């Protein structure tokens, strides 16, 4: 969870974000009920019309993973209910820790069933968590230190951080070593 990234939003932007997430959760739950009742098997859920004003990047639709939704439906329903008074204007939106936690919880649940991020406009949110995250701290390296060594790495988000005080002449420090499937480093890649 990353509710801290929501703290940079003003009350109005947070309110709009809550309204969007509340409405979008409603659309996802409607599709879940329709599927359960045999009315529809379509996993494409339209994005509510406020998305382009609220999200940094507004998707055209959400492709719902019904397996994930079956597991997360009670949580999405509960979080949506908890946010109802804020989404409908009954309660005033203020960025208090509990409200931010509920908002981020609903967002994370929607992201899990849709397989894509929903970052609110104005939010400084880091990239998605990596599939592999390695951190090494060493005083002195005389041999080889590698964060990740693998034969196949294609399609993985990888973060390798190595902090070494001294590398001897015989030493080698490698962040990621692979034989195939290596992509380009992200623009934020750096050697620590």
Image: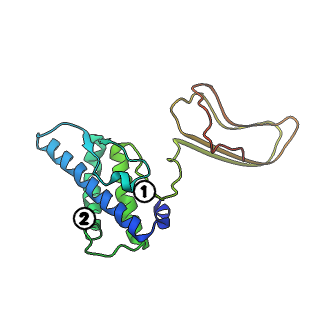
In front here: 181 or 12? 12
Binning the other alpha carbons within 10 Å of mark 1 as few (below 14), some (14 to 19) or many (20 upward) gives many
Q: Residue at position x 26%, y 39% from top?
A: 44
Disc 1 target residue:
120
- Position of 100 with respect to 72 (left or right) is right
Q: In screen coordinates, is 97 left or right of 20?
A: right
Residue 137 to residue 67: above or below: below
1 or 2: tag closer to the N-terminus: 2
Tell me residue 103's x, y (percent). 37, 62
- Closer to the camera, 75 or 140? 75
Residue at left offset 35%, top offset 63%:
16
Q: Residue at x 51, y 55 (%)?
A: 125
Asked which secondary structure carries label 1, the reply is: loop
Location of mark 2 (residue): 81
Question: Of circles 1 and 2, which is in front?
Answer: 1
Tell me whether the residue at label 1 lies in contact with that at label 2, contact meaning CB atoms closer than 8 angstroms: no
């Amino acid at each position: 969870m990353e509710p801290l990234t929501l703290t940079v939003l003003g009350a109005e932007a947070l309110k709009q974000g809550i309204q969007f997430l509340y409405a979008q959760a409603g659309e996802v739950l409607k599709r879940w009920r329709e599927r359960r009742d045999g009315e529809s098997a379509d996993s494409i859920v339209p994005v509510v019309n406020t998305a382009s004003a609220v999200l940094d990047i507004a998707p055209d639709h959400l492709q719902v993973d019904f397996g994930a939704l079956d597991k997360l439906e009670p949580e999405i329903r509960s979080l949506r209910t908890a946010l109802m008074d804020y989404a409908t204007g009954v309660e005033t939106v203020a960025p208090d820790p509990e409200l931010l936690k509920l908002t981020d919880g609903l967002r994370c649940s929607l992201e899990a069933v849709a397989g894509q991020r929903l970052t609110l406009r104005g939010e400084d949110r880091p990239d998605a968590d990596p599939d592999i995250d390695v951190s090494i701290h060493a005083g002195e390296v005389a041999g080889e230190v590698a964060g990740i060594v693998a034969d196949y790495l294609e399609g993985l988000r990888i973060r390798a951080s190595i902090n070494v005080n001294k590398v001897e002449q015989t030493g080698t420090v490698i962040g990621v070593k692979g034989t195939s499937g290596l992509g380009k480093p992200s623009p934020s890649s750096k050697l620590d």
